[in-house]
Structure formats: C-alpha cells, structure tokens
Amino acid sequence: MADIYWILSKIDYLAIADILLVAIIIYGVLLMVWGTQAVQLLRGVILLALIISLIGSLVPLNAFNWLVASSGQALLVVAAIVLQPELRRALDRLGRAGGLSLWGAREYNVEHLVREIVTACQHLSEKRHGALVVIERATGLQDHVETGVRVDSAVVADLLETMFYPKTALHDGAVIIREDRVVAAACVLPLAETIPAETHLGTRHRAAVGITEQTDAVVVVVSEETGVISMARNGRIVRHLDERRLTALLQALLKPRGTKNGRNRLLGRNKSASKTTQTPS
C-alpha cells in the first residue's frame, strides 16, 4: 500500500498528459489496423514483446538483453514495411481531416450525377455488360487516371453505357469520375489480395475492393456474368443493390457537406415547386 501511495504522489499534470498521449497513440494504432489482417500480426508482436520483457526481467541474460535493445530500431522498420497499407490509409485520413484536399473544390449537382450513374448501371445490368465506375472523393486518383485514356466529359448515362459496351476499345478497365466529369476510361486499378467472404468474385470486384482499401473512393460494379450491381467502399463490398438502394447510398456518400449546398438544393426545390403551382391546369 505504501508503494501505491508513493507512485501516486509522483504523478503530476505532466505525467497524466504523458500517459494520455501514449494511450491515444496506442488507441490510434489499434483503430488503424482494426478489421484488417494486421490485427493478428500486431497481437503476435505484442505477445512476443511481453515474453521477451518477462525473460529479460527474470533472468539476467546480458547478451540477450543487448540483442533485444539493439534490434528495436530494426523491428520498427520491419513493422512499418509490413503495415504499409494501414499506415498509408491512416496518413490519408489525417490529410483529409486537415481539409487540404477541399481547396479548389467546386459545387456540382450530386442528384444529377447519381441519377446518370444509376441509370447507366441499371441498363448495363439488364444487358449483362460488366462495368467498373470509380467516383473520386477527397483522395486524388491522378496516378490511376494516367494509366487509362483521358476523356474529360460530362457524366451522361448513354456515355457510360457506350464505354462499357463489350465491343468498344474502352470497356476493359475502370472509368474514373471526378466531381461531375468523366476524366478517364480503361484505367488500371490495384487488386485486393483476398476477399474472404466472396471468394468467387472476379477481377472487377477485386479491383473495386483494392482501390477502396487505399483511398476513400466509392466504386460501383456491374457483374458481367450475373448482372448484379455492387458498391465498394473502405475495402468492403455490398452486393445485390437495386436502383433505390444504390441511389440512396450514393447520395449519402457523395452529397456535399455544409449549409451552402443544402441551401442551394432547397432553393432549387422551392423554385420547381413554385413553377408547378404556377402552371395552369
């Protein structure tokens, strides 16, 4: 009991802040790797560190303790290499939190964009034409844009259907949409290493999951074999979407934040309502 009182007497505001900072860092690391394969690796590393610390504290092994102390920096480098996807995702989220990616962003009609994408996907699904539509958000996709053919066109359902028609030159690959413009077609995307829950999914679905593991993009996939419409986000994929569900999901994910855009949409509804009331019967 005396030892506990002695420890508590040594704790001041600076020590509390130090403990909280370490706890926040540990919590951030756990949150960063939660739901990924790195969780098992992190558990193994923690267990190994505890065993080594226990051995070093119980048995006076000078050479062993020196080896452990000397290999600490090397282990950090190895951990950074192994956890590279998770670290990249964390830094990407940190950059988006800073708001730097919003500089220069312009307003556009989200409802029109979603309507054109959903219409195109519905028609492609009925015809069993495969499609892979990537919608850029805060994370830039310029590296992937450069792997395809530059288009720079308005998002129109007929254009998307034509691009993914099997006999066209641009049907093999992904279409990337930035704001309300189709910037490139036939783009190459990174493939997800594994999709445990859906092992039968093909290359399009693996590419959709792969790009969403690295960025915050939203991807809509139309299966060429079954015509099933899916959507991928944050490394997860949702399948068997109908027109209503796909529209609701895209509008919820793509609608701009802030009162200005909401006010513009509200004004647009009021104008349309006023025009309707003024129309003679």
Image (cartoon, rainbow, N blue to C red):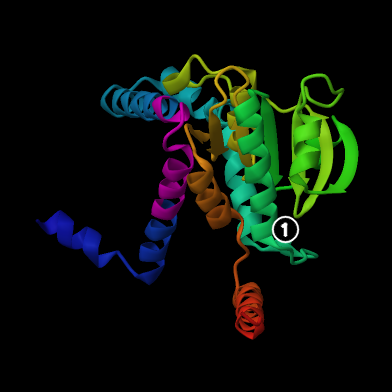
Would you identify the image quadrant in which residue 12 lies? bottom left
The percent coordinates of residue 61 (x first, y second) are: 36, 19
213 and 188: which is toward the camera = 188
The C terminus, quarter of image: bottom right
Q: x and y percent of residue 228 in the render? A: 53, 28
Q: Is residue 207 visible to us here?
A: no
Label 1 sits on residue: 101
Give coordinates of residue 46: x percent, y percent: 37, 30
Three-letter amino acid code of the residue under disc 1? Ser
Q: Nearer the viewer, residue 154 or 236?
A: 154
Q: Residue furthest left?
A: 1
Tell me, yes or no, whether the highlighted magenta stretch contains residue 21: no
Judged left or right of residue 122, residue 47 is left
Residue 48, located in which quarter of the rendered image? Answer: top left
Foreground: 9 or 193?
A: 193
Give the residue displayed 69% in from the left and 26% down from the top: 190
Q: Nearer the viewer, residue 10 or 195?
A: 195
Disc 1 crowd rating (10 Å Cα; few below 14, some 14-19, many 20+) is some
Which residues make up the magenta segment?
23-40
Residue at image point 67% right, 24% down:
130
